[in-house]
Image (tube, rainbow, N blue to C red):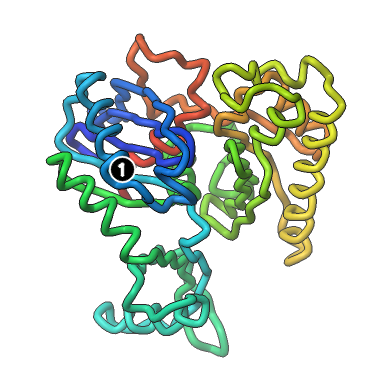
Amino acid sequence: MGLFSKKTLSIDFGNQFLKFAVGEYKNNHLVIDQLFSTKINEGIISNGKILEYNLLKDVVSQMIKEKKVKASNISFTLASSDIVKREVIIPIVLEEDESSLIAFEIEQYLPGPTEDYIIQSKALSFIESNDEKKKRLLVAAMPKKEADLYYKLSVDLKLKPLSFDIHSNVMSKLMKHTNLNSAGESFERNSSLVVEIDHNFIDVFILEKGKYKFGRRIFSGIQELIRFRGVEGDLEKSNFKNFLEEENMTVVQEIDYWSDEIKKIIKYYEDLSDENEIGKVFLYGDGALIKGIDKSFSNRLALTTEIFQVNSVVDLNENINSNDLASYMNAIGALINE
């Protein structure tokens, strides 16, 4: 299944929180030993970019020590608008010639020269175009200066770096390896809308037959609900999980805005082809912990909406609080290497 065979620490880097998962693959399951998080001070990380390296290293080192983490490997995941993601189509060529073609295709979308970026690609499918067989790829490019600091972190922590990935990709891998569907359904035959509700943003992406198609960001999130409620900005003190039950009109109006923006994304996708249709919506992230948020979206979108769950291929340590699992999906998915 391509999962790490040695115990790995994965970290999901957010502006306000770091989410950690410790696990390994054995006996045909991904075994999760620990899930934990810590709040970080404003200005340490912004939009995936490390601004205060020494402070970040100290926080991570302290958490590893405090939680008595025993792992030899490390993997990272984050969301950043600095990471350019595009679908490209190239002719089928020798493997040694493919990287230059990919760089040429992605260059037009980059604000700087390709040599300033780390470029990774993932094959999506093969297509026929003008009687020529071609390859369709998802390409991601991240500034080297930003990626180098994450590599430095792994070295300073004395852990072997295994992967550096983005949220949409780790979630597509996790969904592939999780038995989401009831008998008779096939996740890889349908298109799904995946929605991560974070503190400062909402990332929405389409998985078409199990593979990433495209994504969009909505610049809102839990912090907007907290602000509208007129409570302190600290997530842990805001009682945000009960916001919908309070029926506060400003909160309801903001969630109306979220759903309206998501409808636009769905419409754009379905207008691309008569065959495009969203089968189901999956929610995750801290915002998925808001009570009733799945029913709220189901009603607004007129689509079956569920909080993303892991089951058949993931075993959780009995000490893990499964009620907060939706907020750790990126960290869990980062343990999968394909």
Single out the residue that lies furthest toward the bottom.
130
Give the residue type at disc 1: Met
Where, by quadrant of the figure, is residue 246 drawn? top right
Residue at 52% x, 27% y is 326
Tell me the SS state at disc 1: loop
- Is 291 on the left or on the right of 152, as rendered? right
Report the front residue among 308 and 27.
Answer: 308
Residue at 54% x, 48% y is 188
Where, by quadrant of the figure, is residue 224 drawn? top right
**Residue 184, how many percent across, how many down?**
60, 35
- Is 47 on the left or on the right of 218, as rendered? left
Q: Residues within 10 Å of mark 1 (few under 14, many from 20)?
A: few
Residue at 35% x, 30% y is 20
Question: Looking at the image, is 282 positioned above or below residue 205?
Answer: above
Single out the residue that lies furthest toward the top.
319
**Residue 189, how many percent across, how many down?**
59, 49
Residue carrying label 1: 1
**Residue 140, how many percent across, how many down?**
43, 64
